[in-house]
Amino acid sequence: MSYEKNEDFFKTLEQWIEQNGINIDGPKGTSHPRFPNLIYPIDYGYINGTKSQDGSGIDLVKGDDETLKIVGIICTLDPVKKDSEVKVLLNCTEENIKTAMIMMMFNNHIMKGILLRR
């Protein structure tokens, strides 16, 4: 697969964000609805008008740098639920990416994740 095809993937996600917007339902500093001990260390939400494997919108982590756009995705595997998800990294600095990876793995301590950079 060529680099151009990889770039098309990220450009499509950016188009969906531009067309539909995002919803931050887990703002930085608030508690996760099912895991009250998890305080979101970074804004967490989804892309409006999209659908992921679990039936909700495609997950999104929004970082601090508005100039960066989408910098990558995190793909997660949950051995308990036996499912996978994609988390889009929007406006994320290197520190934001580290924070997002730590947050994803905290959910149940056995979730596996891989970072795919743009």
Image (cartoon, grey):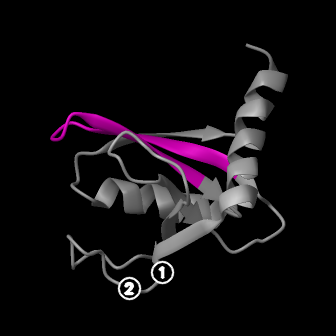
Residue range of the region highlighted in magenta in the rendering: 71-88
Lateral position of residue 30 relative to residue 81, left or right: right
Examine the structure image and report whether residue 77 is included in the region drawn in magenta: yes
Q: Quadrant of residue 53?
A: top left
Q: Give yes or no for contact between labels 2 and 1 (Cβ–Cβ under 8 Å).
A: yes
Q: Residue furthest left?
A: 80
Residue 43 visible in the picture: no
The three-letter code of the residue at mark 1 reads Pro
Residue 26 visible in the picture: yes
**Residue position marked by numbered label 1 in the rendering:** 27
Lateral position of residue 93 relative to residue 73, left or right: right
Q: Residue at horizontal 18%, vertical 40%?
A: 81
* Residue 20 vs residue 35, the one in the foreground: 20
Crowding at dot 1, Cα within 10 Å, few <14 / some 14-19 / many 20+, comes out as some
Q: Residue furthest bottom?
A: 29
* Residue 91 vs residue 110, the one in the foreground: 91
Q: Residue at horizontal 69%, vertical 75%?
A: 64
Q: In x, y percent, where is residue 58? A: 49, 50
Question: Which SS type dominates the magenta stretch?
Answer: strand
Q: Quadrant of residue 68?
A: bottom right
Secondary element at image label 1: loop
